[in-house]
Image (cartoon, rainbow, N blue to C red):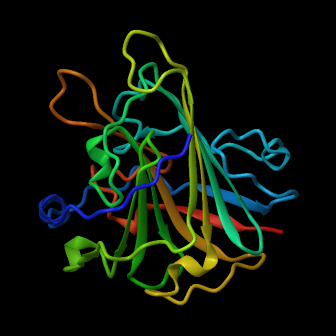
Amino acid sequence: MMFVSKSVSLALFAAVACTAFAQDSKPLPPPAGQPKVYEIHRASNPINVDGRLDDKAWKKVAWTDDFVDIEGDAKPKPRFRTHTKMLWDDKYLYIAAELEEPEVKATLTQHDSVIFHDNDFEVFMKPLPNQEDYFEFEMNALNTGWDLYLDKPYRFGGKADNSWNMEGLRTAVAVEGTLNNPADKDKGWTLEIAIPWTAFSSRQPVPQPRDGTEWRINFSRVEWKAGQPREDNWVWSPQGVVNMHVPERWGYLRFRK
């Protein structure tokens, strides 16, 4: 299924930015181990972005480690499994993810809503590791997205640019169950994201990767639980702190032929 819509929630965005700045201004605890590494290979066949992960090219691609709590192994293991895998070709960075979820639900349908108010999947990318700026993308099970550009982390006075859009972005979701129906038990949802190399050009000149190119990257899953006032944050490479805006603690994405 695919749903596309577009709008901007400026008041909510400002509130989220202020909260993030307050979190980032606190001293950081020690990191939770070494950042993880994923070696991404070229796609052997075209990818049909439909959210189903059944393309031939995905079959032999390794999954990442299962996501853990954002603070690391000192916190409880996530209730539901999440993992991701990646490919690339001359046009796109491809990201696939599988999210175990017994009750798949989502409410937000406007593009650039504050997507983590729903259960969501998030990508944080720093294509040029030696520069301060980076990119963020979030999506929910309705395939509603939120794309952001940040000139630097909030704790260094960074400001999020909510006007940036990933031109040419392709995304899709497939629900293994029934969306927004608590009467049955679901298996979860899968997603595919295709980000063109040209998507960054209005904010940062990002060259197409070559064999050996290295990015900083991390993935996050926000999961809400009934009766629990705060969300769970599950990530690929643990941050050691409840804050995704610490790019020096993200994992490494290494491009291979």
Residue at the limit of the structure toward the top, as seen here: 183
Q: Residue at x 29, y 32 (%)?
A: 224
Q: Nearer the viewer, residue 230 or 110?
A: 110
User: Which residue occupies 78% across, 61% down?
Assistant: 41
Left or right? Give the position of 203 relative to 174.
Answer: left
Q: Which of the two residues, 33 or 48, is positioned nearer the viewer here?
A: 48
136 over 204 or under it: above or below: above
Percent coordinates x, y for residue 53 in the rendering? 71, 41
In this view, the residue in front, 14 or 84, is: 14
Residue at 45 percent across and 19 percent down: it is: 102
Q: In the figure, 107 relative to 87: above or below?
A: above
Numbered label tally: 0
Placement of the N terminus among the 4 image quadrants = top right
Residue depicted at 25% across the width and 64% down the height: 8
Percent position (x, y) of residue 180? Answer: 38, 25
Residue furthest bottom in the image: 205
Left or right for 65, reference 243: right
Asked if 166 appears above or below 68 in the picture, the reply is below
Q: Position of residue 212 (x, y in %)?
A: 74, 75
Quadrant of res 14: bottom left
The answer to which image quadrant residue 228 occupies is top left
Name the image quarter holding the C terminus.
bottom right
Q: Position of residue 154 (x, y in %)?
A: 23, 72
